[in-house]
Image (cartoon, rainbow, N blue to C red):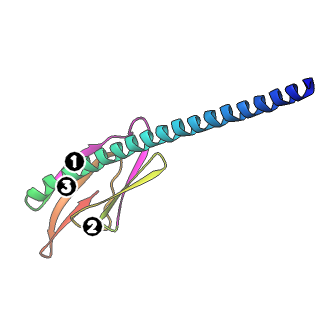
Amino acid sequence: MKKQIKAQTSVEFVVLITFMLLVFTVTAYLIQTRTAEAQNTENMKYAKQMHNLILNEVTIAETMPYNYTKNFILPFYIDGDNYTVTINEGVELVINFRSKEYVYFFNKNFDVGSTIKPGNNVLTKKEITGKIVYQFN
């Protein structure tokens, strides 16, 4: 009878430890998921701010006459991290930040040779053969 009580106690102990381990694992998973979600939201916010900064310069250029040129500066770092900004096919603004790619679309076509980067940039608006052309240098 004494062996049966020891065996029952051992089984109950193993079940309790398994249950506690399961609760700990689920809690750790939920915390990790919430933390990753908050980080992704913050990264999207930074990318959107960079998009808005560039879009504001384009909006200003739209209201200006032809042969408009504007120097503007993009920050070298976002929240202490490097990033890259590219323009694909003259319509896509791609911001690579913390191993994620954020894609935004312009409502104006830019010259295919347009490049934009952290630091000093130049936005120009020209009329070429009756067509308005925007370009980043």
| Secondary structure under the numbered disc 2 in the rendered image | loop
Pinpoint residue 61: horizontal percent, then vertical percent. Answer: 14, 55
Say which amino acid is labelled 1: Asn
> Disc 3 designates what residue?
58
Q: Residue at label 1?
A: 71
The reply, left or right, for residue 96 in relation to residue 125 is right
Q: Is residue 30 left or right of residue 77?
A: right
Image-quadrant location for residue 86: bottom left
Query: Which dot marks residue 30?
Result: none
Relative to 101, does residue 128 appear above or below in the rendering?
Answer: below
Quarter occupied by residue 65 = bottom left
Please tell me whether residue 122 belongs to the stretch shown in magenta: no
User: Residue 21, percent across and down?
Assistant: 68, 34
Figure quadrant of the C terminus: bottom left
Q: x%, y% of residue 43?
A: 40, 43
The residue indicated by pointer 2 is: 111
Magenta highlight range: 69-88
**Numbered disc 1: secondary structure:** strand
**Which comes sooner in the sequence, label 2 or label 1?**
1
* Secondary-structure class at tag 3: helix
Q: Residue at x 44, y 40 (%)?
A: 39
Instruction: Give the alpha-carbon distance from disc 1 to disc 3, as whole Å.
Output: 12 Å
Marks 1 and 3, the one that precedes in the sequence: 3
